Amino acid sequence: MIGEAVRSQLHEIGVFLSNDRAARHKQLFNPFFSIEPESLEPTDEELELLRVLTEEYRTSRFQPTEIREKFWGEIANTIRLWKRADGWRYRRLTWTSPAWAPQTGCSLEDLFAAVFR
């Protein structure tokens, strides 16, 4: 479970808990990423890596001025993150299958390599 201190750090980098109402309000934030509330807490190193990788993802896809305009179209496909004992997994909001990828967990670096494809 993610504690309040880590939740606050995640909010600062733009990663909201998937059941967090703030993530659903486009005027508050455009949620490219969310994290499952049942996730294990990211370490300090993983939080820093999440900050770097999520910002790189955002800026590699869109110019900052485009983000608000295109939210409901191209970038409404939030990527949900989940840290388990065996590593990280993800799924996209628009996937119809409940499956997470990869089937077995991986490092955060490998996960973002898959997301960037």
Image (cartoon, grey):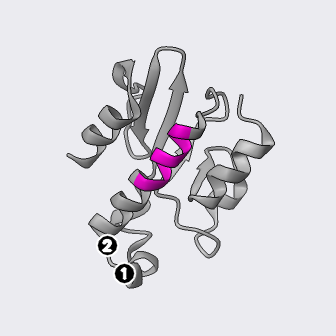
Instruction: Quarter of the image for the N terminus: give it.
Output: top right
- Res 115 label: none
Residue 56 vertical placement versus 66 (above, below): above
Q: Which of 24 and 37 is in front in this view?
A: 37
User: Alpha-carbon distance for marks 1 and 2?
Assistant: 6 Å
Which residue occupies 30% across, 43% down?
115
The stretch drawn in magenta includes residue 47: yes
Q: Nearer the viewer, residue 90 or 69?
A: 90
Q: Which amino acid does label 2 sit on?
A: Phe
Q: Quadrant of residue 17?
A: top right
The dominant secondary structure in magenta is helix
- On the image, numbered disc 1 is attached to which residue? 66
Q: How many marks?
A: 2
Give the structural element (helix, strand or loop) at label 1: helix
Amino acid type assigned to the residue bearing label 1 in the image: Glu
Q: Nearer the viewer, residue 21 or 6?
A: 6
Q: Does the magenta stretch include residue 29?
A: no
Nearer to me, 115 or 44: 44
Residue ranking furthest to the bottom = 65
- Horizontal side of 4 relative to 92 (left or right) equals right
Residue span colored magenta? 45-52
Do the CB atoms of the residues marked 1 and 2 lie less than 8 Å apart?
yes
| Residue 71 spot, x, y in % from top left | 43, 70
Identify the residue at image location x=55%, y=47%: 34
Instruction: Give the quarter of the image for residue 14.
Output: bottom right
The residue singled out by tag 2 in the image is 62
Q: In which quarter of the image is residue 64?
A: bottom left
Residue 88 vs 26, above or below: the answer is: above
